[in-house]
Image (cartoon, helix red, strand yellow):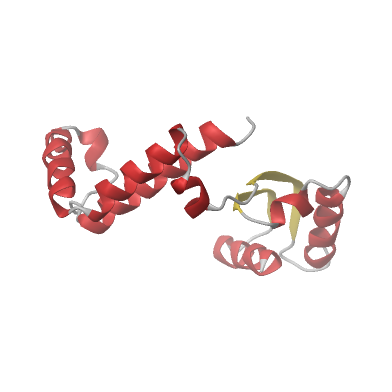
Amino acid sequence: MLPQRLEDAVAAAERSVICRVRLVGRGPLHRTLQRDGYLESLRIALNGTGEQRLPFFWCERVVDATMAPLDREVRRQAGDFLGTVLRSIDSLRDDPNELTDIRKTIDGLFRSTRFRKYFPDGYNDTDLINLLRDAEEHIVTALVDEP
């Protein structure tokens, strides 16, 4: 999948590409990426597929920004602060009245051009739910993961 993404980048640029790959997300692959020398081996393998063509692609470095897997349901049931936060976010996401309250709060932000650039066509409940999901991920990262 990653080599195909790099091929797509070369095709979109219509010229050679020199890049730095940043891997993100949460899951079991995190442990593999932590192994000594794995990222360098990945970089070498990627370059082996892209250097022999024109236009070429060359990866300068692979950066691991992944996170360990999290059993959200187990953490949600916990009696700690994170469990409380996850239950609160679920409540906000699942209650139409809460989404309405959030919408009322955010509506005032639309007077700001800085905010409107992220939602040029307005926003809907799906956008709000996605914002809550993103906020949850930031909170989980801050409370659980190493910096």
The correct choice, above or below, for 25 with respect to 4 in the image is above
Q: Position of residue 46 (x, y in %)?
A: 79, 60
Residue 59: x and y, percent?
75, 51
Q: Is residue 20 above or below residue 27?
A: above
Q: What residue is shown at x 80% (from left), y 53% (from top)?
A: 43
Image quarter in which the N terminus is found: bottom right
Q: Quadrant of the C terminus?
A: top right
Which residue shows up at 68% across the image and 64% down it?
A: 2
Residue 4: image location, x then y, percent: 66, 69
Q: Is residue 63 left or right of residue 147?
A: right
As rendered, which of 66 and 114 lies closer to the eye? 66
The number of callouts visible is: 0
- Residue projecting furthest to the front: 79
| Residue 101 horizontal side relative to residue 18, left or right | left
Give the image location of residue 89, x and y in percent: 33, 44
The residue that appears at 25% across and 37% down in the rendered structure is 115
